[in-house]
Image (cartoon, rainbow, N blue to C red):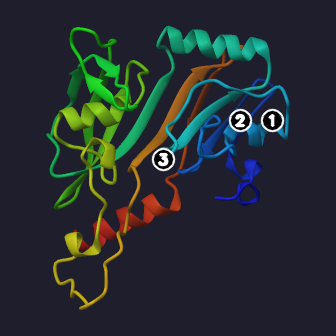
Amino acid sequence: MKKNAWNAREMIVYDDDNYTIINKPASLSTLEDRNDSTNVLSLFRELNASYKVCHRLDKETSGALILSKNDEAFRSAAMQFQERTVEKVYHALVKGRFMNEVIKVDVPLRTSGSGKAVNDRRNGKEATTLFRPKQFFKDYTLVEAKPLTGRMHQIRAHLAYLEFPIAGDVLYGGVPIYLSAVKKDFKWKKDVDERPLFNRVGLHAQAIKLTNVNKNFISISCDYPKDMSLILKKLNKFN
């Protein structure tokens, strides 16, 4: 997406003298990557040069992302992430019927040379995530995830470990969602390639909670992006 297609102000869901919390769109990087120089930080520094990103979301992951406006706020958020007192809730759409209980995954992760998080109980770093089903469909489940640590691709890798890869997450064994897979009476048109209904990592940072510099709590939830809302409506209707 071209730079002028992003509107930083429209992403803001919370704003005060210390922090701005945004609902990050999918396909927008948090920081500059080698494929696209346009990112959350560059967009928001056009509004205020003091902005710093307090944590990261994967490029394809949408949802709650915290930016600080001053050094004191940045240090406070960094300390809270280090002490694991920031509460984060993610929603992930997975293929299959997830277990009907709270599942704790405590599997150390290591980043491989290919940029993928791999399970490594000997050399990996501590990684813990709590999962529970939020909504069941016939062939899919919307899963709530609460990461207690903050490793790269943690939720994606842990769901793959449970053999419930996130829909659209090809890197970890997930597959796109097609209408033919969810609609019972789907009629295939000859000589026409079916396009996926949903073709990116189905992961959304739904809520986040931290302590402000003045010791008041900030608790924010973020709506699903349009594509995720639409696929959930399709699953409710057909699956």
Q: Tell me if residue 82 comes above or below residue 197 in the rendering.
A: above
Asked if the residues shown at circle 3 and circle 1 are in contact, with their CB atoms under 8 angstroms apart, the answer is no
Secondary structure found at label 3 = loop
Where does the image place residue 72, in percent across and percent down from the top left? 76, 11
Three-letter amino acid code of the residue under disc 2: Leu
Residue furthest bottom in the image: 190
How would you rate the neighbour count of disc 2 (Cα within 10 Å): few for under 14, some for 14-19, many for 20 or more? Answer: some
Q: CA distance from mark 3 to mark 2?
A: 16 Å
Seen in the image, is 58 located left or right of residue 162? right
> Which is nearer the N-term, disc 3 or disc 2?
2
Which quadrant would residue 33 be assigned to in this image? top right
Three-letter amino acid code of the residue under disc 1: Arg
Residue at mark 3: 60
Q: Which mark is residue 125?
A: none
Residue at mark 2: 41
Which quadrant of the figure contains the C terminus? bottom left
Q: Tell me if residue 232 comes above or below residue 112 in the rendering.
A: below
Q: Residue at x 73, y 16 (%)?
A: 73
Q: Nearer the viewer, residue 97 or 189?
A: 189
Q: Tell me if residue 110 comes above or below residue 41 in the rendering.
A: above
Where does the image place residue 57, in percent across and percent down from the top left? 52, 35
Which quadrant of the figure contains the N terminus? bottom right
Secondary structure found at label 2 = helix
Which quadrant would residue 21 be assigned to in this image? top right
How would you rate the neighbour count of disc 1 (Cα within 10 Å): few for under 14, some for 14-19, many for 20 or more? Answer: some
Residue at mark 1: 45
Secondary structure found at label 1 = helix
> Which is nearer the N-term, disc 3 or disc 1?
1
Q: Residue at x 48, y 47 (%)?
A: 60
Three-letter amino acid code of the residue under disc 3: Glu
